[in-house]
Amino acid sequence: MIKFRDGSEKLAEKTILFVCVENAGRSQIAEGFFNQKYAPKGYRAISAGTRPSSQINPIAVQVMKEVGIDISSSQKPKIITEDMMRSSEKSVNMGCIESADVHYYS
């Protein structure tokens, strides 16, 4: 529970981190599905990549629109940070293995 100066309180959200190399396809789709359809109360998803692309793959955006989820306006590829890894409840590697030495914390 987080207490604010005005006396209000809010449950601390738990974060699920979806990781891929370019953060342009699978991890973005996973973030969109989790946040829009499957997140339990108090959870949210973020996604990141080790070498993020400059934009989300247009095919991923199209596929998600077909199922009623818009990832084009609220999501963008981003680089994974140590803070993201340490503060996430769970990290999910989307099967995009590369040779870089990346350490995942859970």
Image (tube, rainbow, N blue to C red):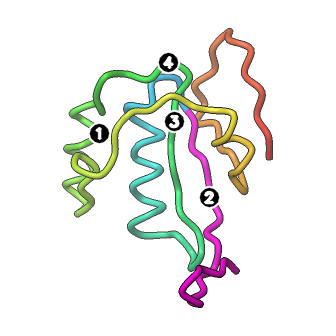
Q: Quadrant of residue 19?
A: top right
Q: Is 9 part of what is drawn in magenta?
A: yes
Q: Secondary structure at mark 4?
A: loop
Q: Nearer the viewer, mark 3 or mark 1?
A: 3
Residue on which the image places disc 1: 60
Q: Is 61 part of what is drawn in magenta?
A: no
Q: Which residues are magenta?
A: 1-19
Query: Disc 3 and disc 4: Cα gap in Å?
Result: 9 Å
Residue on which the image places disc 2: 15
Q: Residues within 10 Å of mark 1 (few under 14, many from 20)?
A: some
Front residue of 87 and 71? 87
Decide which of tag 1 and tag 4 comes sooner along the chain: 4
On the picture, is 58 further left or further right than 105? left
Quadrant containing the N terminus is bottom right
In the rendered image, residue 86, in percent from the top left (x then y), is placed at 74, 44
Decide which of tag 2 and tag 1 comes sooner along the chain: 2
Going by the numbered disc 3, the residue's amino acid type is: Ala
* Residue 96, above or below 14: above
Residue on which the image places disc 4: 51
* Residue 106, above or below 67: above
Q: Residues within 10 Å of mark 3 (few under 14, many from 20)?
A: many
Q: Residue at left 72%, top 57%?
A: 89
Query: Disc 2 and disc 4: Cα gap in Å?
Result: 21 Å
Residue on which the image places disc 3: 48
Q: Residue at left 28%, top 28%?
A: 55
Going by the numbered disc 2, the residue's amino acid type is: Thr
